[in-house]
Amino acid sequence: MIKSPKRLIFLSVFALLIGTAAHAISATVIDTDSEQIVTNISGEIEVVDIPPSLDGGDFTSPTYIRLMHEGSGTVTAGMPDFIYDGAYHDPELPVAPGDNTFGNAVTTPYSGPGLPAVGTEVYSILLHFDPDLYSLPFSLSEGIARSAFITFNRPILGVYVTSGALNTTDDIFTPSGVTFPSTPGRDMEFNYVGNSGGDQYSISPDRNELSLTMYVHNGGVLDEMRIILISAPVNSCQGDIEPPGGDSDVDGSDLAVYISNTTVMSLEDFAAQFGRMDCTQI
Ligand SMILES: [Ca+2]
Ligand SMILES: [Ca+2]
Ligand SMILES: [Ca+2]
């Protein structure tokens, strides 16, 4: 509702500007900056580029969990729901045999916002640990465990750790040509531990931090986890639209961008936010 004369004048000036200066300034596409998404890593982990093949034995390191930015993808109807915010093997319980990701595990229920609507852009990071122990004699108790702590600049929507969920989401994020592990053993396993530890992960209550251990036993293959985040920080002011991602206010710079593309929001909504200086990235 427009009630005050002052507001009417404000809107009239905007309308005039839009009419005379349309398309004078182009908005820049806002890219998600992968460097900013991961704000800190510690432990036995390194950031690497995605190799041509992630299949067992093709991208090995006994020392580091590999962190790879898969980038943005679009939520599909078949994308699995998130089920747990944490898991580890219950020390009171025996090994749950077979390919049994959460067998005899202690789990933390999922408490995040869930998957965004189909068609929403989200961002993926893949973790991969393959210490190349496949050729050794089979032993669940002997192997290599590596632990890491990752801090993000936005909340974790959720993680995928089962082979089914990983397989289902590979094609959503991956640049064409990458070969993913063909083995169901690409999952994490919370159904046993070895002498040096076992698979575990935990998402912090504010959802910005992830701690994890990946354990691969002698004669075993590898572990992977896919971390799903919102694709870009969301600005609390829709009108703070100047690239890249706004600058915490709604002022003349934003007006210039708005004039170039008035489809992003209504003129009245933009006018209502004009002058705000409290915009934040959330
Ligand atoms: Ca494992
Ligand atoms: Ca595994
Ligand atoms: Ca601004």
Image: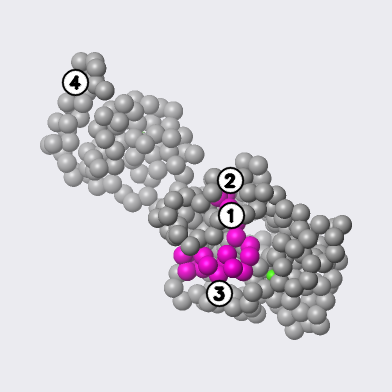
Q: Is residue 274 above or below residue 205?
A: above
Residue marked by disc 1: 82
**Which class describes the residues within 10 Å of circle 3: few (<14), some (14-19), or many (20+)?**
some
- Tell me the distance, in whole angstroms, between the alpha carbons under discs 4 and 3: 59 Å
Circle 1 sits in a helix, a strand or a loop, which is it? loop
Which one is nearer the viewer's eye here, 251 or 270?
270
Q: Which of label 4 and label 1 is nearer to you?
A: 1
Q: Is residue 257 visible?
A: no
Circle 2 sits in a helix, a strand or a loop, which is it? loop
Tell me whether the residue at label 2 lies in contact with that at label 1, contact meaning CB atoms closer than 8 angstroms.
yes
Residue type at tag 1: Phe
Tell me whether the residue at label 2 lies in contact with that at label 4, contact meaning CB atoms closer than 8 angstroms.
no
Q: Is residue 199 left or right of residue 53?
A: right
Task: Identify the mark nearer the N-term, 3 or 1.
Answer: 1
Q: Is residue 77 visible?
A: yes
Task: Identify the mark nearer the N-term, 2 or 1.
Answer: 1
**Which class describes the residues within 10 Å of circle 1: few (<14), some (14-19), or many (20+)?**
many
Residue type at tag 2: Gly
Residue marked by disc 2: 112
> Looking at the image, which residue is at 15% across and 38% down?
21
**Which class describes the residues within 10 Å of circle 4: few (<14), some (14-19), or many (20+)?**
few
Task: Identify the mark nearer the N-term, 4 or 1.
Answer: 4
Q: Which of label 2 and label 4 is nearer to you?
A: 2
Residue span colored magenta: 156-174
